[in-house]
Image: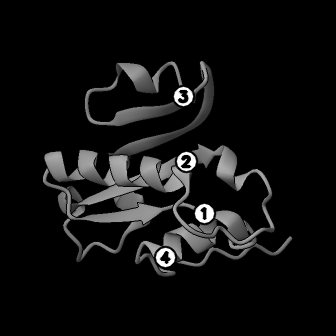
Amino acid sequence: MRSSLTLKDRDVLVAVEAGEVRGYVIAQPISPLLVPTAHDVASIGAIDDFYDDDFANVSALSTGKSKGGNLLAAAESAFARRHVDSALVVCPAAWLSKVSLLERRGYRTAKLWMLRR
């Protein structure tokens, strides 16, 4: 995180409540390795690091207007200022509290990674 704060191509946003950090999001350029070559990576951002206390119960569905939603909206605004019109959010499929928020905000599954050992 300390290194991310020095990079000028991303926004690190933090949510504070009653003097305590309750969440954060990092809006950054997407790596060309994450998208097929036909796509213009300059117009796609990535949110690979995103947490809010609203997501603490991983298996609970997020309902209503969450403060995590405010962080996501702030990241989307940061992308808009950088003329980025699409975002890929990294989110484990079983993290229902985060998935439900993302789906309500119009995100849908775009990539599935599977591993066999």
Q: Position of residue 85 (x, y in %)?
A: 20, 64
Rendered image: mark on residue 16: 3
Q: Are marks 1 and 2 in contact (CB under 8 Å)?
A: yes
Query: Is the residue 43 above or below the residue 26 in the image?
Result: below
Q: Residue at x 69, y 73 (%)?
A: 93
Q: Label 4 to label 2, Cα distance in Å?
A: 16 Å
**Residue with the mark numbered 4:** 104
| Residue 19 appears in view | yes
**Residue with the mark numbered 1:** 91
Q: Position of residue 9 (x, y in %)?
A: 26, 35
Say which amino acid is labelled 1.
Cys
Going from N to C along the chain, the mark reached first, 4 or 3, is: 3
Secondary structure category for the residue under label 2: strand
Secondary structure category for the residue under label 1: loop
Query: Is the residue 112 above or below the residue 30 in the image?
Result: below
Query: Is the residue 26 above or below the residue 1 in the image?
Result: below
Front position among marks 4 and 2: 4
Q: Which color scheme does this rendered protein use?
A: one colour
Q: Position of residue 101 (x, y in %)?
A: 55, 68
Query: Is the residue 90 above or below the residue 13 in the image?
Result: below
- Quick one: 54 or 114, which is closer to the camera? 54
Q: Label 4 to label 3, Cα distance in Å?
A: 23 Å
| Residue 30 appears in view | no
Front position among marks 3 and 2: 3
- Crowd rating for badge 1 (residues with CA inside 10 Å; few <14, some 14–19, many 20+): some
**Residue with the mark numbered 2:** 50
Front position among marks 4 and 1: 4
Say which amino acid is labelled 2.
Phe
Secondary structure category for the residue under label 3: strand
Rendered image: mark on residue 102: none
Q: Label 1 to label 3, Cα distance in Å?
A: 22 Å
